[in-house]
Amino acid sequence: MTSPSLTSSNRRIVVLTGAGISKESGLDTFRDADGIWSRVSLEEVATPEGFRSDPAKVQAFYNARRRQLQDSEVEPNPAHAALGRLSRALGDDLLLVTQNIDDLHERGGADPVLHMHGELLRARCLACGADSLWRADIDRDSRCSVCGATGQLRPHVVWFGEMPLEMERIYAALADCDLFVSIGTSGNVYPAAGFVAEAREAGAHTLELNLEPSEGATLFAEKRYGPASELVPAWVEEVLAETGKDTGLAE
Ligand code: APR
């Protein structure tokens, strides 16, 4: 049960999601036993140094994931759909922040979605700095749709050692929220792993929904463990009932 003090209709909620919410959609997590970092070296494919030393290897890594994401098998799961429903019901009272670079939150109906680690379906131009929607492979012949430069595109993804996106907006929301909910993240990577402490500092209730206790589990006032496709719809039902903002649109 979410803390009773939060049953007012206009509470402000910040939700943070990680790779665990997309696992049941068929996308691998990073640090599970079968995770991406058990197969590929993050230093080689997810750092600026890796990109400098072997851009073709990095492009191939993200090209394969971009193709997989657009595979018809990969669909939003009930957790994404539930957050889409919550997003429509709460509007500006919800800020959905994701560490994920997939578009499953958007396809599940959430809007806006803050991608603090960037987006797999966008490319960034090293010549002009613009990022644009990009569904194809990126290679040496790829041409920037803004400035026309060729062979200057990289994935619009935040690598280790780079500054995550939208941090000002995220910290402002954490300082002002009544409820912080972390879903499907291991709590291994900062700054996202520090959000729970920011929310506690602001006096917010904190809830972890995950398959198993994360690194930061002890910092959460409330924890529920199990698959996101079960936990998230149940939690969203509770919130919509408590806030009386149920859209009535069953998923
Ligand atoms: N339902 C809920 N949680 C799940 C599920 C599931 N079906 N399956 C796995 N999980 C949990 C795991 O228990 C784990 O705690 O999801 C978490 C995934 O953790 P990570 O693989 O570390 O992914 P994440 O926390 O998103 O990683 C953060 O690290 O490599 C970088 O940039 C990358 O955004 C990523 C960041």
Image (spheres, rainbow, N blue to C red):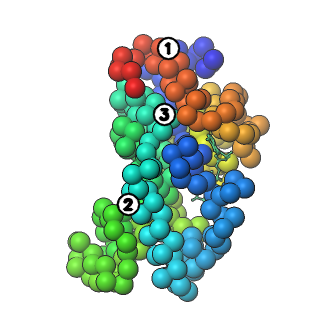
Q: Quadrant of the C terminus?
A: top left
Is label 1 in a helix, a strand or a loop?
helix
Question: Which residue is found at the position 59% from the left and 67% from the top?
Answer: 160
Would you say 192 lies left or right of 166 here?
right
24 vs 182, nearest the viewer = 24
Is label 2 in a helix, a strand or a loop?
strand
Amino acid at circle 1: Glu
The circle drawn on residue 78 is: 3
Q: CA distance from mark 3 to mark 1?
A: 20 Å
| Badge 3 or badge 1: first in the primary sequence | 3
47 vs 5, nearest the viewer = 47
The circle drawn on residue 242 is: 1
| Badge 3 or badge 2: first in the primary sequence | 3
68 vs 205, nearest the viewer = 68
Q: CA distance from mark 3 to mark 2?
A: 22 Å
- Name the residue that disc number 2 marks: 121
Would you say 13 lies left or right of 223 here?
left
**From the viewer's perspective, is the residue at label 3 or at label 2 nearer?**
3
